[in-house]
Each structure stands twice: as C-alpha cells, then as structure tokens.
Image: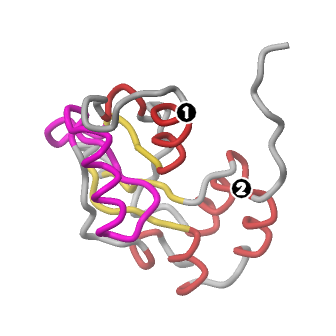
C-alpha cells in the first residue's frame, strides 16, 4: 500500500497568522496555489484559502493590507500523518470535502508536507475518482433564515 509519504509535497511554504491578507494573496499568486498553511513558529494553527480571503475579507469590506491572516483563516484544519495510507486519507478528504491536507509529524505535530488530490491523482490512481465525486457534491449555502 502506498503511504502519504510517497505522494506528498515536502517543501511547504507557510505563512504567519500575523501576516496580512494581502501578503497571503501575493504568496498564493507567486506559488500558484489556493491555500497556505498558517504556522505560529513551528506549530500549525490554521489554513488560509483564496476562498477565506474572498468571503471573509473582501466580501466583508476588510482592507487587505490591514487585515491579518488570523482574522480570516480557517482554524479547524484536518491533518494526516506521512505513514497513513493514501486510501485512508482519500477517504477522509471525501468525507469532509477537502482537496488538500497538511501532513504533520506524529510526535512534534510540526508540518512536514502537504498532500493534495492532484498529488494523489498523479501518483496513485485508485479511488481518486470516487473521492473527487464526493468532494464535488454541491453544498448548501450557510445562510441564516
């Protein structure tokens, strides 16, 4: 069985919760990614996505150069370990409809990589189509009635 270690991206760029949303957006542009792990020192504290920036900052009228990453980042981050099987993590990704998962060390919980659905599709084809179908299920708007 293939493990996450076999398919993950190892050199992961991170951002500080104290950085600005503008800096996060610039990093996403430079790295050609839609999300960046947020670390306070060596500790993973969240993820910031292009959607977080759009919905929680821009749509709310926040100024990108004054708003901190910590103000808009997602804090309920799903993680995995490098020794988990690809199939197990694919199942978790499908269950919670996410496309990227930070990989953390089991002892220190420091980030050691990131694994995406694309990584798995490129290096491990089994079950990727089923996971993509689960991730792509329409979500209902989270709006007060």
The one of 69 and 104 positioned closer to us in this rendering: 69
Element class at badge 2: helix
Above-or-below relation of 63 to 101: above
- First to last magenta residue range: 16-44
The one of 31 and 106 positioned closer to us in this rendering: 31
Q: Pointer 1: residues within 10 angstroms few (<14), some, or many (20+)? A: few
Q: Residue 141: which numbered mark, if any?
A: none
Q: Pointer 2: residues within 10 angstroms few (<14), some, or many (20+)? A: many
Q: Residue at the location (31% across, 29% down)?
A: 67
Residue at far top of view: 145
Above-or-below relation of 80 to 45: below
Snapshot quadrant of residue 140: top right
Q: Residue at the location (38% across, 56% down)?
A: 103
Q: Which residue is denoted by mark 2 in the rendering?
A: 94
The quadrant of the picture occupied by the N terminus is bottom right
Above-or-below relation of 43 to 105: above
The quadrant of the picture occupied by the C terminus is top right
The one of 39 and 110 positioned closer to us in this rendering: 39
Left or right of 57 in this view: 26: left
Snapshot quadrant of residue 125: bottom right
Q: Which residue is denoted by mark 1 in the rendering?
A: 59
3D distance between C-alphas at marks 2 and 1: 28 Å
Element class at badge 1: loop
């Amino acid at each position: 069985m293939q493990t996450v270690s076999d398919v993950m991206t190892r050199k992961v760029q991170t951002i500080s919760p104290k950085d600005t949303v503008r800096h996060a957006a610039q990093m996403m542009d430079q790295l050609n990614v839609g999300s960046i792990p947020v670390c306070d020192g060596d500790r993973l504290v969240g993820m910031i996505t292009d959607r977080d920036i759009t919905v929680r900052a821009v749509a709310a009228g926040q100024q990108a150069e004054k708003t901190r990453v910590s103000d808009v980042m997602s804090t309920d981050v799903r993680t995995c370990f490098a020794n988990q099987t690809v199939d197990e993590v694919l199942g978790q990704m499908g269950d919670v409809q996410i496309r990227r998962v930070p990989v953390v060390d089991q002892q220190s919980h420091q980030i050691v990589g990131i694994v995406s659905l694309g990584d798995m599709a490129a290096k491990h084809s089994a079950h990727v189509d089923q996971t993509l179908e689960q991730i792509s299920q329409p979500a209902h708007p989270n709006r007060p009635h």
